[in-house]
Amino acid sequence: MASLPIAFDREARQVNAMPAPPTALLGREREILVLADPLASGDARLLTLTGPGGVGKTRLAVAVATAFLDRTTPERRFRSMFVPLASVLAPSQVLPSIARALELRDDPGAVGDPARTLAIGIGHTPVLLILDNMEQVIGAAPEVATLLSACPNLIVLVTSRLALHLRGEREYPVDPLPLPVAGSETAAAVSESQAVRLFVETAQCVRPSFQVTDANAATVADICRRLDGLPLAIELAAARMKVLSVTALLARLSNRLNVLTGGPRDLPDRQQTLRDTIAWSYHLLTPAEQDLFRRMSVFAGGASLGAVDAIAGDATASSLDLVTSLVDHSLLRQEAREDEPRLQMLETIREFGRERLADSGDDAAARDAHANWCLALAGAAERRLAGSEQGAWLERLDLEGDNLRAALRWLETRGDPGDALRLATALWRYWEIRGQLREARLRLETALDHATESDPTVRARALNNLGNVLLDLGDHAAAAGRYDGSLALRRALDDREGMADTLNNLGLLALAQADLATARTRHQESLALRRELGDRWGIALSLSNLGDAANASGEFTTARDLHQEALEIRRGLEEPRAIGYSLNNLGESALGRGDLVQAAESFQAALDHLGAVGDRNGEALAHHNLGATALRSKRVDAAAASLLRAAKLRVAVQDRTGTTDTLTLLAQLASTAGNPSLAAEIRDILRLHPVPSGSDAWQTAMETLLASLTASLEPKHDDA
């Protein structure tokens, strides 16, 4: 009978040494503990480490095995054996490879039967077997199960890009290394990331003087994020530091796969370049799986299962099975969510997929399908952003922001200006609510400039929506031109609903310009059309805007009545954002009447509604009004706190007019209260978060305010 030819009275790891890593393993301390525990307790006899190529499965497996062996007692010492399977191409050769690694001789009764040879040779001996890179011979999984059944003291630790799917198997997906926390900019903060630590350690191998400093910390963090925290990618990139600065390296990572080459000669061929590492997994897929993998590379920022169906082509019926297989092969990652799972592709893997998609000739078809899905999503969202489902749809568009931008870029570059205009037009309200006004202006102006022959109905909507964005940005002259163009088209089309919309917006523009007579006229024209159409949502809006005009005229009781009527309609429609604005308007009319208690209550209720839906413009407005009310009530500290919150929000959403109003009020408060720390904070807001320049008058106002604040903080000298 065969036996294991090792000295049983010596520690197994001294006899059957595992590969010694050339460098220390970083950032896996928790995983080592979590994985060694079930092996030591006997809870797991088959443990499979899964994950994409280059994530560090082999290094982790060796560390886990070492930690496990350190816990064994002299009474139950394990013999360990590391069996590399990367060069084994046929499942039938896995057991013979294990037998050769263990140096087992065939038993006379087991010639040609490697399973029996292993079962007899191992017997009841405690053995830890590490099977490395099993994904290409996954067909041998049943033989591993047979071996575990025949050898009661055998433990098998597997590394593979896909699980074995055996009973009793404990799968552990190995994640990339933790990335720097978003917003980390200092050397100390960035260096807490294990991904950064690996980058620095590897870079110092080729440039010993390299250090993370406050000056380069943000760039180093961006490099590690661009590389998804993949250890192999980080090591390949850091090796480029021999000739590149971190800034130059980051710039070249726009084409990662061409940079991440030239690995150490002692790595396997498949890990000499990141492209080859991913190709190893890709070639293990069936043709149908390869096709869906390529198509899924069009998604930016992930996708839902429903979105995958939209781009799956002929494979729609079987897309769930194909997606499951791609997850199993570690080419997709599932992000758990309460509603529907979200599928993510690491950016390095996605870049490989896009290369293969371009080579396949299906690139345009896949990206067209993706753009059509985005158009349908944006169209559905535009209708629901003005209703009771607003919050849920804002969250959905937040989730799909990268996909929507990618679709816009595709439609712009492929020469389909009509669809690009439709998509940008459908997204304007989302951009406005989220305070992304600069992006809204850029996208709408670009689309309008290219779509000169577009559907006049779509063009009229786009001009009107761009006017809204320009009004929010304080560019009144440009807004007027867009509104006039929209109204002319809508009159020509006899689009009465559209005419009511644009007339309403022209009233808002007149109000912003303090032309109260024109504001009333436009809003009354709009209200008449909306009553004729039975448009309750529009009626509430026109009533609200007439209330604002009344407020501006000092007719506070009339304003209250108009805003109360609008509020009742909006409550019936269950639209939280519009309810929030009506409550704010009621607060402004109460403030005008001198009812400070009612004003504060209304502004707080408005803030609650607007904050719940993430309307940053609305939140800023409510904070500003709460601050102004507190100031009227002589509550200086509360006023300063609310106004500072409003200022930071208005700077963030690039609201020039609102920023001027809030910062001016804050500066007056700081001066009156003799509060130098408040003045310094206001000055820092202006210095650190400058709003993009607008009109000369606005820019001059901001520069004057900054100079005044700076002067107020300078030491006063006594000339006497």
Image (cartoon, rainbow, N blue to C red):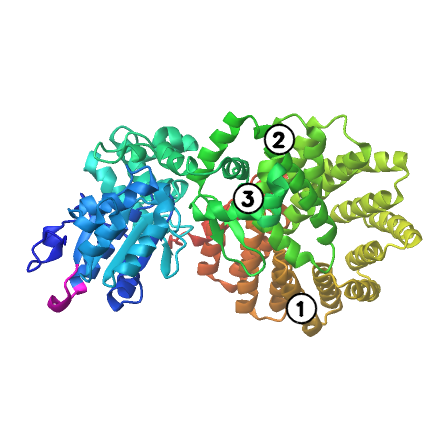
- Quadrant of the rendered image containing residue 274: top left
Dot 3 alpha-carbon crowd within 10 angstroms: few under 14, some 14 to 19, many 20 or more: some
Residue 309 in the image, given as x and y percentages of width and height: 62, 44
- Quadrant of the rendered image containing residue 239: top left
- Quadrant of the rendered image containing residue 36: bottom left
N-term mark: 2 or 3: 2
Residue 81 in the image, given as x and y percentages of width and height: 19, 51
Q: Tell which tag, 1 or 2, sits nearer the viewer.
A: 2
User: Label for residue 365?
Assistant: 2
**What residue did someone put label 3 on?**
691
Of 500 and 352, which appears nearest the observer? 352
Q: As drawn, which residue projects farthest toward the right? A: 532
**Cα separation between marks 3 and 1:** 29 Å
Badge 1 marks a residue whose secondary structure is helix
Magenta residues, as a range? 71-78
The C terminus sits in image quarter: bottom left
Which residue corresponds to the image point at 62% horizontal and 48% vertical from the top-left?
A: 306
| Left or right relative to 76: residue 640 | right
